[in-house]
Amino acid sequence: MTSPQDSVPPYVHPYIPNAVPAVRQAMLEEIGAASVEDFYADIPGGIRLRRPLDLPAPLRSEAELTRHMEELLSRNTSTRQTLSFLGSGCYQHHVPAVVDEVVNRSEFLTAYAGEPYEDHGRFQALWEYQSMMAELLDVEIVNVPVYDGFQASGTALRMAGRITGRRRVLVATAIDADKLSRICDYVRPDHDVTVVPVDPDTGCADLDAVREALAAGDTAAVYADTPSALGIVDEALPRLAELAHQAGALFVVGCNPLTLGVLAPPSAYGADIACGDIQPLGLHQSFGGGNAGFIATRDEETLVAEYPSRLFGLVPTTVEGEYGFGDVAYERTSFALREEGKEWVGTAAALHGIGAGVYLALMGPQGMREIGDTILALTAYARRRLAEVPGIEVPYGDALHFADFTVRYTGGRSATEIRADLKERGIFGGVPTGGHEATYCVTEVHTKADIDRLAATLEEIVK
Amino acid sequence: MTAPHTPVSVSPEDARIADKPRLRRFQQASWDEELIFELGSPGERGVLVPAPDPSIGKAEIPPALRRAEPPALPEMSQQQVLRHYLRLSQENLGADLNIDVGQGTCTMKYSPKVNDQFVRDPRIAALHPLQDEDTVQGVLGIIHSLEQLLKEISGMDRVSLQPGAGSAAIYTNVAMIRAYFAARGELEQRDEVITTIFSHPSNAACAKTAGFKVITLHPDADGYPDIEALKAAVGPRTAALLVTNPEDTGIYNPRIEEFVRIVHEAGGLCSYDQANANGILGITRARDAGFDLCHFNLHKTFSTPHACGGPAAGACAVSEDLAPYLPRPTVEFDGSAYRLDDDRPESVGKMRPFYGVVPNLVRAYAWIMSLGAQGLRAAAETAVLNNNYLLHKVRQIPGVSIPYAAGRPRVEQVRYSWEKLHEDTGLHSEDIGLRAADFGTHYWTSHHPYVVPEPMTLEPTESYTRADLDEYAAILAEIAREAYEDPETVRTAPHRSTIHRVRPEALDSPATWAVSWRAYRRKVLGEAGR
């Protein structure tokens, strides 16, 4: 048996008020316990740790901790300190100050899973997020955010699978390798994923190959990303919808919601399920920690029944003129039914939904149109400008690009070498996607002068 | 002009402010706030967007891809957006504002403000995940160091911090189990996962999602996980045991080593859901009980804020045998520099974009570094002390009982039952919870299904003072008194919260559920579509 003396003597820390020895003793006495060891009576002695954990000496004061953390942070160089053309799934956009002000509010930041009374605010803010996303996507159902866009795509495809009862998933546009990895893992028990290669010249979907793949008749969903992993907004999207529907499959589209002030939402060209990542909507890059996913559909019972996620609904209260909220069709979820629910639901990314809602409210229809136009124009300019650099080719011709685009280096130097040289010159960019190919990204934070500087710098190093 | 002030003589007795009542006269903010779609007017702007140099021209959008109608988003000026959301924030009871012991299983501990400062720094917030490794050595070092800390805390060999939350970590562990058996050619045979009813529902749900059949064990007559039921369930089809311990009842399974041994002898793996680790930090570890995998919820045990339901963060810790299957990339350290290793052929692949919910990894690292080994143990012991103190107070309240394992201590939380109060008054646990909101506190019943009738789950953590716990217990005692003496007050609660009882009937009917403003307008208001 463990004796009370084995217990570490109480000590005082600002986060642990009842560690004060006199308080601890008084509480033990009131309970009638000799020591805290009494409460561990069910833990067998054989699996008790008989030594202190071997951890670094603590930095108990805020001053010491802050100094230590500052030393670590000083070893990072942020995209604010440099000129960054990195995208590929995480985007540098301006985050409005009001978004940060709201999501950093203690009331939102530290709340969790209260009822729609004392936590009325988060229910309303998330329902408004759902509603604003519904306007953007031109549908009636949008979920409370899931972890990230990868998860959203995986779940959207499993929803399509449950609805159709079919096995195959066809990926028709260029897809990020990591996203594909996640999707393949996630749908594995029920689905096989077939990637239909895009046309190497246009970067766009190969409709003949898609048609051929659909002929087997076992396809649950045709999946497309817009923009694709190449940054391309594919003109064939409406045709893909037709092909999918003719084959009895659903059309599932992953999209960047920031494009939708100017580009047609997936529902407009036949998507049955839209999904994607809301990181571009006012969420910080945070080294890839700022992602959150959405799923959106028409308001049809067969679709709604397949969502694993929480869906908040607007309802009356017992007082006239009061808005109340609650969970729509809760019995779908694993919260209600454990393994008999749809996939699972749990803590995911709610605060990112609130932040994205604030962003959409600040931007409004005009802001969303302007940012879409701005990024499209800057992307087109960057592609034209870099194509002028000797030793660089910009593939995929006239295809419409948003933010991300591909360049090919023809001067013999590798994408890895060029990225390193850019970094030495104070520019982050050119994520290698092959030996002599790389992805760049521009957003509204960039100017023409930034792009000209990138072109001039590449001109120095590309050969 | 007002009349000149004439001093009036007042006795000290008249100037004395009476003592406060025994319970707080709480009134939550209730702004009667509009929906955001009812605010603003056409043309108002919340933020402006930079316009590019006109010389670069515009991009041509093919007609089929051009948006036909602008989205009907609100049009609001900046302060009006801010005010709307600040009002909503005031109508939300964050953990910083209340004695948040009523959200059992969720470990609502204090999330230190200084740690928020670190993650708002641009050298975290404005880092891109595809920067060159030598420009992100600080954050890679934090991730790597946090992995080392969690290795020691769990006793396991390798850690991945990629999962986005606790359930994502459970899923990741199941995916690794699946990969492990697939590599051994046993996956077709081993298609069953065993869990317990008082483990988090995501253990069952994630296993099912990953393709396994689920067997759920219920407690034995003494209230502990039923070892005879385990023996009956286990066999050549067993892939894994997925259990929480202490369970969501706060009961620690004293036969946990035997559970693990039985599953191992049948060739299965054992995965430990450590969502309830807060009372056992430095006391006992996953490795000590023989587990092959475990996971922590960094937003519970390691203090990162719960954020209205995420972003959170999960940590998976595994034995050397499972390490090849960890999500990629891993963070490696060669003694001088950190790098990302994406070349891991047996890996289950990516569990999310990039490397994890990095801001919460930074916070969890800072929290552990502030406490150290002695602090973690003090946190655990104090959480357990607080729980047993609250148990001592609550068990004296009429109508409450503590099912299972009678007379045994609980670790860091307790699942209570109001069955007696329900039988006596007709009121439900939910009613008590809604009345608790009138006193400025949260209250949660429990996960479904309600195996414990009329459940209530309290988890006080180490963050609260004795006076805080006394206040929470006094609130419950007052509500129980009301339930017996004035049940209508409880039945119609809340009375001092932001809103009154919702009428939820519309939520379950496709004809009336309204997940968006436009759905509400179409279905409930009968407005035609645009």
Image (spheres, coloured by chain):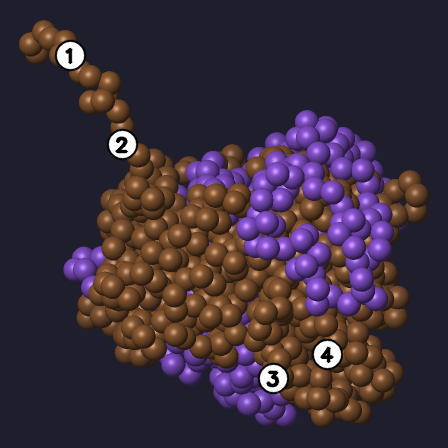
Chain colours: A purple, B brown
**In the image, which is nearer the foreground, mark 4 or mark 3?**
3
Question: Would you name the residue on which mark 1 appears?
Answer: B9
Of mark 4 and mark 2, the one earlier in the sequence is 2
> What is the distance, in whole Å, between disc 2 and disc 1 at their CAs?
20 Å
B296 sits to left or right of A237:
right
Q: Are marks 4 and 3 in contact (CB under 8 Å)?
A: no
**Residue type indicated by callout 4:** Leu
Query: In the image, which disc is placed on residue B241?
Result: 4
User: Can residue B121 be seen in the rendering of this structure?
Assistant: yes
- Name the image quarter holding the N terminus of chain A: bottom right
Find residue A462 and report its image quarter.
top right
Q: Residue at x 34, y 50 (%)?
A: B439
Q: Chain of mark 2?
A: B
**In the image, which is nearer the foreground, mark 4 or mark 2?**
2
- Name the image quarter holding the C terminus of chain A: top right
Question: Would you name the residue on which mark 3 appears?
Answer: B221
Residue B36's spot in the image, x, y percent?
30, 51
> What is the distance, in whole Å, between disc 2 and disc 3 at their CAs?
53 Å
Of mark 2 and mark 3, the one earlier in the sequence is 2
Do discs 4 and 2 share a chain?
yes
Residue B315's spot in the image, x, y percent?
71, 59
Question: Would you name the residue on which mark 2 appears?
Answer: B18
